[in-house]
Amino acid sequence: MSRFQKWRDMRHKTKVNIAIGLILVIGGLALVGYPAWLWVEGKIEQYHLEQAFNNPSIEFPDEEYVRPQVPGNGDNDDYVVDIPEWTDFPPTKVVIPKLDVDVNVVAVDDLDIFARRLNHPPGYYPTSAYPGQVGNVTIAGHRDGPAGYFLRVNNLEAGDLVILETPGYSFRYEVERVWIVEPTDWSVVAETDYAALTLTTCQRVGTDSSAKRLIVRAKLKDVVLNDTE
């Protein structure tokens, strides 16, 4: 083999090694960058939801409508609060003081969105009750990943507070129980004859992160009127 051929082969190998190195670097950056981008995208979405929460555009029935009353957080045991009859799902946050969770919720039409978007915020089941109403307010959320706001809900116990904050109102629910069901058990989202809140999330079994469902059921305790000024 001539000196020229050796030089040409060496140059070719160098180019191949450089190309392989670039591919590995780009692949590594993608592996690191994609989760980071999901996290950033989720934070941006939360920012916009926060803006909507602070500047709500909510329609209520006319003034002749008799608003339902629920227990208020006052010194008098007979103190009650008139709550709105929502015509649509209002801007809402889930606040769990014990777990330092404070996150905006969105209404979803397709619950399969959670499988497609790892950074999707907690989602309100569109056929469930509205905050404060008699019935079952149902909210699903990720337990891990960039939107794993429900990561530690398994640590909740009977008596712990889960709060649904809406413009002007904080609906305080008290946890009744936490349990695990099959993913096909839809009874947990069925209507109730009292004002209930149900949080649903995935429960890992072995390597399957969504083998079961973890359920948190809470009952409306009282309502706090928020200062909207």
Image (cartoon, rainbow, N blue to C red):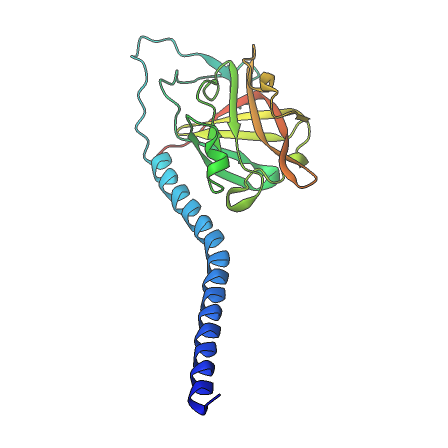
The spot of residue 28 in percent (x, y) is: 50, 62
The spot of residue 104 in percent (x, y) is: 45, 36
75 is higher (above) or lower (below) than 122: above
Q: How many marks?
A: 0
208 is higher (above) or lower (below) than 179: below
Q: Is residue 62 left or right of residue 102?
A: left
43 is higher (above) or lower (below) than 22: above
Q: Which residue is rendered at x = 46% and y = 65% of the image?
A: 23
Q: Nearer the viewer, residue 129 or 182?
A: 182
Q: Which residue is rendered at x = 38% and y = 8% of the image?
A: 66
The spot of residue 106 in percent (x, y) is: 42, 32
Q: Quadrant of residue 12?
A: bottom left
Residue that protrudes farthest toward the bottom in the picture: 3
Q: Nearer the viewer, residue 81 or 50?
A: 50
Q: Nearer the viewer, residue 220 or 24?
A: 24
Q: Is residue 139 left or right of residue 154?
A: left
Residue that protrudes farthest toward the front in the picture: 1
Q: Which residue is rendered at x = 62% and y = 27% of the image?
A: 216
Q: Nearer the viewer, residue 22 or 53?
A: 22
Q: Is residue 120 left or right of residue 57?
A: right
The spot of residue 34 in percent (x, y) is: 46, 53
Query: Which quarter of the figure is the C terminus placed in?
Result: top left
209 is higher (above) or lower (below) than 18: above
Q: Quadrant of residue 26?
A: bottom left
Q: Which residue is rendered at x = 48% and y = 16% of the image?
A: 133
